[in-house]
Amino acid sequence: MKVRSLKQVLHWLFLAVGAISAVVLAFSVITYVEYARDGYGLEASVEDAWLNGDTLTLKLLVTNPGGMDLILGPLGNITMNSVSTTYIPDGLVQSDDTTAVLVSFVLEQADIETIDSTGIASFSLDLQVTVSERDAVTNLHLDVIDQEVIT
Amino acid sequence: MGDLWNTQDIQTREFDYGRYNTVPWVLLKSFFAICMMTLVYLLYALHELPWRLFGSVIGILILVLAPFFAGLILGFTFESPKAALAYSIIIGFVSVGSCMALMMLPGILHVTEFGFGLNKNVWFYGFFIPFLVTISFVPAGALVSSSTNVYE
């Protein structure tokens, strides 16, 4: 094969790889900015919920697809009829891992009565996400509708 | 010996510069080279992305081979190795700069508050490592290709 045709092949290969790179670069940058805006890539779902007296405890399954250890917390809010704030003591979610995190909130009387009468709860959670490697704190927002609560 | 020299000289001049080295092609090649190098530098620096290059042997291979490939293609553009070297290193440094800028983007846009940790990461993973890779592998690729420009 002549060097000229090798050069031609390399040029076309480069153009193909370059075009793909441009697309992946745009996608990666958008994802990175979105991570910083909300949740840092964490995906959370409510596995179980218990109401014990005035304390609602949620077992969250939190998945961290990235390669950076993240800390859920230290502060979290639950919004039902009223807003309750709590402190999350150990919310370490290691990289490439799914971790169960328990979060407890002391609820207002109106919210307790709603859960007692229906057995279900709809609420939104706003949990801080601490990214120690970047010295950053962002927010993980979660909307939960009709979650069964064990009373 | 004189004949051999003349043949080499003609072959050098007959290389198909016209086909792949017109201004639009060179601009396109440069743009794609910047995209490609910025992408691998960024994917090595951003540990939070699921498709990161950090932490694997394949990742390091991609990190060093992409700039080599970019340098290789940029080097085909120039008859003079000196020009190829200068141009490809400049394109490499532009990529390092754009990697740093893109890494700082969430801080610049104030989507969340960052502390000193981001700056530390930007300087190490966004500048230092890409800088070392650029000065090592981009000139290597550029010189390999510009030295083959004498062959048909």
Image (cartoon, coloured by chain):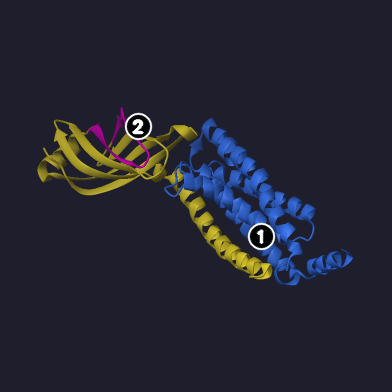
Task: Give the SS element for disc 2.
Answer: strand
Residue in the image at 49% along x and 56% along y: A27
The hue of chain A in the figure is: yellow
> Which residue range is magenta in the image?
A84-105
Looking at the rendered structure, the kind of residue marked 1 is Ile
The hue of chain B in the figure is: blue
- The answer to whether one can see residue A13 in this image is yes
Count of marks, rendered view: 2
The 10 Å Cα crowd at callout 2, few under 14, some 14 to 19, many 20 or more, is some
Q: CA distance from mark 1 to mark 2?
A: 52 Å
Counting from the top left corner in percent of width and height, residue A123 is at 25, 44
Would residue A1 be found to the left or right of residue A62 on screen?
Answer: right
Instruction: State which quadrant residue A100 falls in.
Output: top left
Q: Which mark is residue B73?
A: 1
Give the letter of the chain under mark 2: A
Looking at the rendered structure, the kind of residue marked 2 is Leu
Would residue B93 be found to the left or right of residue A149 on screen?
Answer: right
